[in-house]
């Protein structure tokens, strides 16, 4: 199914211009066990409904940004730039 994503820099573009980056998750710290790392690397949520995801605009501005999308319909509900706690 094809859909469009509204890049914060470029506007609405077809999904094939982007790379999916998964859902935002907390990376394990240095004391994490192998099991915790395996969970982080290989077990990803597969939500049927709204979720927030990382997307990368690989064909144009090279921006990583956040997209709130309904995975059942591929409707993009919101896009926004990532703002770290220091900004
Ligand atoms: Zn862009």
Image (cartoon, rainbow, N blue to C red):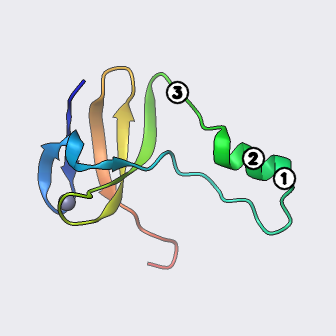
Decide if ligand 1 comes within 8 Å of the CB at mark 2. no
Disc 1 versus disc 2: distance between alpha carbons? 6 Å
| Residue drawn at x 37%, y 41% as measured from the top left | 68
Q: Judge left or right: residue 87 versus residue 11.
A: right
Q: Are marks 1 and 2 in contact (CB under 8 Å)?
A: yes
- Tell me: residue 61, above or below residue 74: below
| Residue located at (27% from left, 49% from top) | 18
Across and down, in percent, residue 83 comes to: 42, 68
What secondary structure is marked by label 3? loop
Q: CA distance from mark 2 to mark 3?
A: 20 Å
Q: Which mark is residue 13?
A: none
Identify the residue under disc 1.
34
* Residue 47 sits above or below residue 69 on the image: above
Seen at 54% across and 29% down, the residue is 46
Q: Nearer the viewer, residue 78 or 64?
A: 64
Identify the residue position indicated by label 3 in the image.
47
- Residue placed under numbered mark 2 in the picture: 38
Residue 62, x across and y down, in percent:
27, 65
Marks 1 and 3 sit apart, C-alpha to C-alpha, by: 25 Å
Whether label 1 lies within 8 Å of ligand 1 gets the answer no
Mark 2 lies on a secondary structure that is helix
Give SS at disc 1.
helix
| Of the image marks 2 and 3, the number of the one nearer the N terminus | 2
Q: Which of the two residues, 80 or 23, is positioned nearer the viewer here?
A: 23
Residue 32: quadrant of the picture? bottom right
The quadrant where ligand 1 appears is bottom left
Which quadrant of the figure contains the C terminus? bottom left
């Amino acid at each position: 199914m094809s859909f469009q994503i509204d890049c914060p820099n470029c506007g609405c573009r077809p999904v094939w211009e982007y790379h999916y980056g998964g859902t935002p998750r907390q990376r394990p710290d240095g004391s994490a066990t192998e099991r915790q790392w395996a969970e982080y690397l290989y077990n990803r949520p597969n939500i049927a409904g709204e979720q927030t995801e990382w997307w990368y605009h690989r064909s144009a501005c090279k921006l990583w940004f956040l997209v709130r999308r309904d995975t059942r319909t591929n409707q993009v509900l919101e896009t926004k730039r990532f703002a770290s706690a220091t900004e």
